[in-house]
Every structure is written in C-alpha cells, then in structure tokens.
Image (tube, helix red, strand yellow):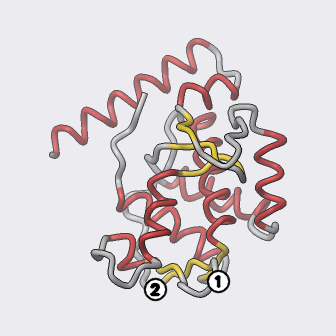
C-alpha cells in the first residue's frame, strides 16, 4: 500500500505546522508532528495527510520524502523544488523556516482541523520528547540502530488496531488516491 507523493500537499501540510509555530520549527520536531498527523489521519480519515512514505530511524518514525526535502533545502546548490520555494532549512542550525505561504488549497477542512489539534497538543514539545513519545507510543517503530528501514502503511494500520472494515476502507482510499493521480499524470 503506497500513495503517490504529492509535494504540494506535503508542503502545505508542513507550512500549516510552521504557521502555527510562528514560522520556525526544529526540523525533527516538524517531522514528528507530520508523522503524528498522518498516523491520526489514517485512523480518523482513512488516508494520511502528507501522502508520504515512512521509515524507522534512530529517533523514531519519519516522513521519508519530506525528510529528504528538508535535507536538500539546506543545500544552496540543490535544484529548486516546490518545497524549497516555500520552506527553507537553515544551513547552520536544525531549523526549518516558512519562506512563503503555499496556501492550503490541497487540504480538506478535516485535515486542517487535525493539524491544528496535533499542534495544540504537541507543538510546544521538545524534539527529543516527541521522539521519546514516538518510541514509546507507536509500536510500528522498530529501532534500526544507526541505519534505517522502510515503515509500511500496513504496519501503521496494524499498530492502530483498526477493524477489518476500517482496513478495507483505508486500502480503498489509497487505491482511489493512486488512481486519481494516475489519471492526472
């Protein structure tokens, strides 16, 4: 089960968190907030918000493609992307900054509400506290040591304890998202 990554939607999701934080966040905190939002969106809405893939890293689960965007936006020689046009990573510190508002046209009202809820509960927490919570509270995360490995949506769904009907709903939603984007491409 994989979604087609939508960089615009992922950027808008991250930008919502950054706006709530006053325009700046530690990148690890942002990634943990994004993961928490995607995980809860799977439970409530049947689809993650960011459309990202996931991985287990030393400090917990991450949104993989967004993590790559964060790293590449710190490189002044990297090719500009939709992400880097709106969000910049400071080369000298682990801070992500909102440079230009990408809007929220790709986010549903339910997704925007969920982002605000996650931020209200977790937005003021230290990045290491967020990582500790992910280690403790998310059984889908397995310690990879000094490496990383993929974390599949099916593993997240299993950890959420969804019913068979809810799992079928998630699988159907993912299939619809993939089909819709395949038609556009």
Q: Is residue 129 left or right of residue 164?
A: right
Q: Which residue has dot 2 on it? A: 99
- Residue 115 vs 45, above or below: the answer is below
Q: Is residue 43 left or right of residue 168?
A: right
Q: Which residue has dot 1 on it? A: 22
Residue drawn at the location 29% of the way across and 76% of the way down: 80
Q: Is residue 181 left or right of residue 120?
A: left
Q: Is residue 21 left or right of residue 52?
A: right
Query: Quick one: 40 or 133, which is closer to the camera?
Result: 133
- Residue 20 vs 57, above or below: the answer is below
Element assignment for label 2: loop
Mark 1 and mark 2 lie on one chain; the one further toward the N terminus is 1
Q: CA distance from mark 1 to mark 2?
A: 12 Å
Q: Position of residue 126 (x, y in %)?
A: 81, 68
Q: Position of residue 170 (x, y in %)?
A: 49, 26
Sort mark 1 into few (<14), some (14-19) or many (20+) by Cα contacts within 10 Å: few
Query: Quick one: 115 or 96, which is closer to the camera?
Result: 96
Query: Quick one: 106 or 132, which is closer to the camera?
Result: 132
Element assignment for label 1: loop
Name the quadrant containing residue 119: bottom right
């Amino acid at each position: 089960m994989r979604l087609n990554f939508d960089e615009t939607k992922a950027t808008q999701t991250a930008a919502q968190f950054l706006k709530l934080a006053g325009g700046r966040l530690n990148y690890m905190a942002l990634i943990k907030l994004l993961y928490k939002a995607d995980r809860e969106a799977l439970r409530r809405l049947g689809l993650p918000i960011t459309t990202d893939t996931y991985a287990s890293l030393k400090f917990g689960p991450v949104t993989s493609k967004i993590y790559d965007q964060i790293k590449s936006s710190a490189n002044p020689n990297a090719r500009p992307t939709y992400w880097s046009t709106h969000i910049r990573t400071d080369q000298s510190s682990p801070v992500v900054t909102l440079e230009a508002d990408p809007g929220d046209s790709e986010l549903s009202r339910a997704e925007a509400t969920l982002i605000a809820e996650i931020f209200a509960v977790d937005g003021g927490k230290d990045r290491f506290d967020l990582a500790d919570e992910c280690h403790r509270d998310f059984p889908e995360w397995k310690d990879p040591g000094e490496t990383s490995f993929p974390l599949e949506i099916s593993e997240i769904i299993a950890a959420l304890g969804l019913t068979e009907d809810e799992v079928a709903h998630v699988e159907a939603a993912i299939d619809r998202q993939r089909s819709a984007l395949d038609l556009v491409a």
